[in-house]
Image (cartoon, helix red, strand yellow):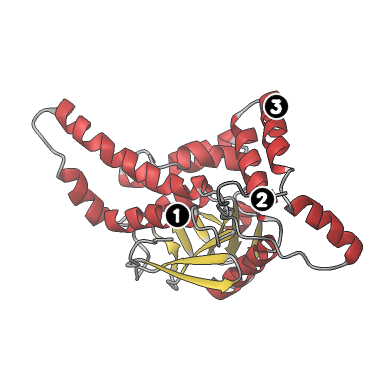
Amino acid sequence: MAYPTPTFIASSRPSPHVLLLSLARPPVNAFSEAFWRELGDTFKAAGRDDDVRVVVLASDVEKGFTAGLDLMSANGEIGAYGRVDPARSALAMRPHITDFQDAISQISHCRVPVITAVHGLCLGLGLDIISAADVRVCSSDAKFSIREVVVGLAADIGSLQRVPKVVGNDSLARELALTGRFFDAREAEKMGLVSRIVTGSRIEVLSDALGMAEEIAKLSPIAVIGTKHLLDHARDHTIQESLDYTSLWNSVMLQSQDFPATVASFATKKKVVFESLGAKPQKRGQSKL
């Protein structure tokens, strides 16, 4: 699988089928255009990597997960679209915004679960990023803010769409977005933004996230991918629509060898080693039976 040349994102394989992606643009992981494009391309590749069953997204920078957008860089990028005619300026700028949105949405679109390990500062674009993930854990020193309104713009990369659904409290989500105020790990856990708080900072929360990822990676990849996919479908559809879709999905996926192998393992007490997600092409005329 061809991943982009790493410039701002370090990658490693700490355990079987677990991909660790670490944001690495000191001092505060401020996102330039090159950075967010690399993030999107990396997650697109990860979602197609048959060896990857879980992704952990963390930060290699001691000060925190990310301070958000690189404002100086962004100001120059936006200024480049300036023209006398506002309509033509808007037509030129909109693809830039949608490209940005698409890059961050690759986290959500990734077919395998994405766990974010947050420590220190997680501001602005950081909320866009973690709200696109499946599971969020944070350290006790984490601080959050939907910061865009404070710097003169409405958040446009996903926070306003995803955070209200994640926390399930429209009033609180609006308060945070409209004031841009900081909130700590305890409040993040209370509102449901994160699953839990890990005492410590970068090393401790990363260890916790990797432990969770390792446990998920041992399970049937067909079952894990299906669970994520069906949870996403349920979030965006009615209960009956999602039940109907689930019956169709599992009418196919229950034919996987993973299910009978797992059931058999309960009787034999033997660990199941699940096959790669990659399909093995058959020769013409060859039968599975």
In the rendered image, the vertical position of residue 75 relative to residue 177, given as above or below = below
The residue positioned 13% from the left and 38% from the top of the image is 82
In the rendered image, the vertical position of residue 65 relative to residue 99, given as above or below = below
Q: Are marks 2 and 1 in contact (CB under 8 Å)?
A: no
Q: Which mark is residue 222?
A: 2
Distance Cα–Cα, label 2 vs label 1: 19 Å
Tag 2: Cα neighbours inside 10 Å, few (<14), some, or many (≥20)?
A: many
Of marks 2 and 1, the one in the foreground: 2
Pinpoint residue 5: horizontal percent, then vertical percent. 33, 65
Q: Which residue is mark 1?
A: 43
Of marks 2 and 3, the one in the foreground: 2
Q: Is residue 48 left or right of residue 249?
A: left
Q: Amino acid at mark 1?
A: Phe
| Of residues 43 and 273, the one drawn nearer to the viewer in this rendering | 273
Q: Are marks 1 and 3 in contact (CB under 8 Å)?
A: no
Q: Amino acid at mark 2?
A: Ile
Q: Is residue 35 left or right of residue 174?
A: left
Distance Cα–Cα, label 1 vs label 3: 29 Å
The residue positioned 10% from the left and 35% from the top of the image is 83
Distance Cα–Cα, label 2 vs label 3: 19 Å
Q: Which residue is mark 3?
A: 244
Pinpoint residue 154: horizontal percent, then vertical percent. 36, 38
